[in-house]
Amino acid sequence: MKKYKIGSFSLFIFLSIFNMACSFNNTNKNTMDTATITTKDFGTFEGKRITEYTLTNVAGMQVGIINYGGILTKIITKDKAGDFGDVITGYDSLEGYLQKGNPYFGALIGRYANRLAKGTYTIDGITYHAALNNNGQSLHGGLKGFDKVVWDAVALPGDSSLQLSYKSIDGEEGYPGNLQVQVVYTLTANNSIKIEYTASSDKNTVINFTNHAYFNLSAGKSPNIYEHIVQLKADKYTPVDTSLIPTGALLDVKGTPMDFTTPKKVGQDIDKVTGGYDHNWVLNKGEGLAEIASVYEPNSGRYLTVATTEPGIQFYTGNFLTGNLTGTKKGIIYNKHYALTLETQHFPDSPNQPDFPSTLLKPGETYHQTTVFSFSTK
Ligand code: GLA
């Protein structure tokens, strides 16, 4: 066997070239140097490779996305002292996301975000039955929603956007029509995450999409979100029955624990709402993109605003977290009320509520949703 002796200089040259080759493979750096996308192997699911894409902007903010479930795996932002921290819940590896009872951490949700009463709805006189997975209701798309499928991922030119595509076939989880869905995640230079959804179907169908990121803006320093100060620009909400299905009424928030029209600590009234907040607020907005919510965490100084084109938002305070999830990031125990979600959406059970904004998508139409999460400090 031949032995090659490599001098330290040659080794240095070799390693430099090797490094360059690796970064060429894994990092697309554009000429403006505005952002980068790096990739990391994240395991396999159903024989398909799962990759974590990390988008990093000039300010150093990082966003991780995997093609399993289109899941946001990390959002690393600065606090007021300039220290970076991860502000969403998640796991260190794919196994965590695959565990039974994973409460949709960071995932894309479809075909129908939130609940459909008894999974049943009617289009053009035909009654459909969506898969039941939540106390006799259909929640977040059923047994295998968009959060549990592998999306095709492509980094778009410009190095700050990742495009995910998925074709949901006619009848999947009890929904009619072949549905082509695209979601583009963009990390902007000024620390916003823009999520743009488009979809089209070859049959009349119903859809409702959202992202299910759970935020705790302390980045692991606080075990709950009671000190987070939330504002929701909504004068009304949709009350629910004991199965968390809307009654169909729109109630005024004024004078109730549901009132977040002026910024309020989450902990102020949470005990007055059974289990905590898990409701859809009716946003004070018309068509188009508008800023409708904010969250401020005074200790870190992190400030998050949410803008959306959607008519509603599910503000959920992690009421069903029980601290039993394994493989969590840094071993953090996610107990009840550890984090909150801001799920921009159409109202739950809209297909059965004629007075709610329609969730019907017809052939020839293109569904659009834009939601933007913007991070800063104050
Ligand atoms: C949504 C629902 C909650 C809960 C979570 C997932 O936010 O509104 O009731 O099911 O998803 O655990």
Image (tube, helix red, strand yellow):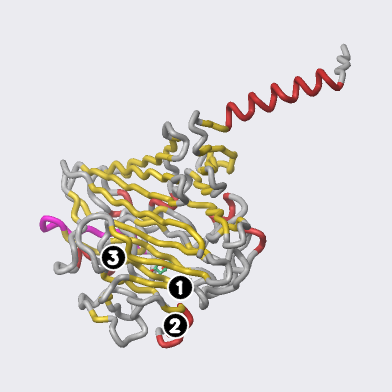
The image quarter in which residue 338 lies:
bottom right
The image quarter in which residue 182 lies:
top left
Q: Position of residue 192 (x, y in %)?
A: 43, 51
Q: Position of residue 353 (x, y in %)?
A: 18, 69
Location of mark 3 (residue)? 312
Task: Using a 10 Å C-alpha cutoff, classify the residue at mark 1 as few (fewer than 14 neighbours), some (14 to 19) or many (20 or more).
Answer: many
> Relative to 80, is 143 on the left or the right?
left
Q: Is residue 14 magenta?
A: no
Tell me which numbered mark, 3 or 2, is placed earlier along the sequence: 2
Q: Secondary structure at mark 1?
A: loop
- Classify 20 as above or below 328: above
Q: Are marks 3 and 2 in contact (CB under 8 Å)?
A: no
The image quarter in which residue 122 lies:
bottom left
Location of mark 2 (residue)? 270
Task: Using a 10 Å C-alpha cutoff, classify the residue at mark 3 as few (fewer than 14 neighbours), some (14 to 19) or many (20 or more).
Answer: many
Location of mark 1 (residue)? 317
Tell me which numbered mark, 2 or 1, is placed earlier along the sequence: 2
Question: Which residues, given as a range, are shown in magenta?
Answer: 123-132
Q: CA distance from mark 2 to mark 1?
A: 9 Å
Q: Are marks 2 and 1 in contact (CB under 8 Å)?
A: yes
Query: What type is the residue that disc 1 sits on?
Result: Thr
Tell me which numbered mark, 1 or 3, is placed earlier along the sequence: 3
Residue located at (14% from left, 67% from top): 354
Query: What type is the residue that disc 2 sits on?
Result: Ile
Q: Position of residue 5 (x, y in %)?
A: 88, 16
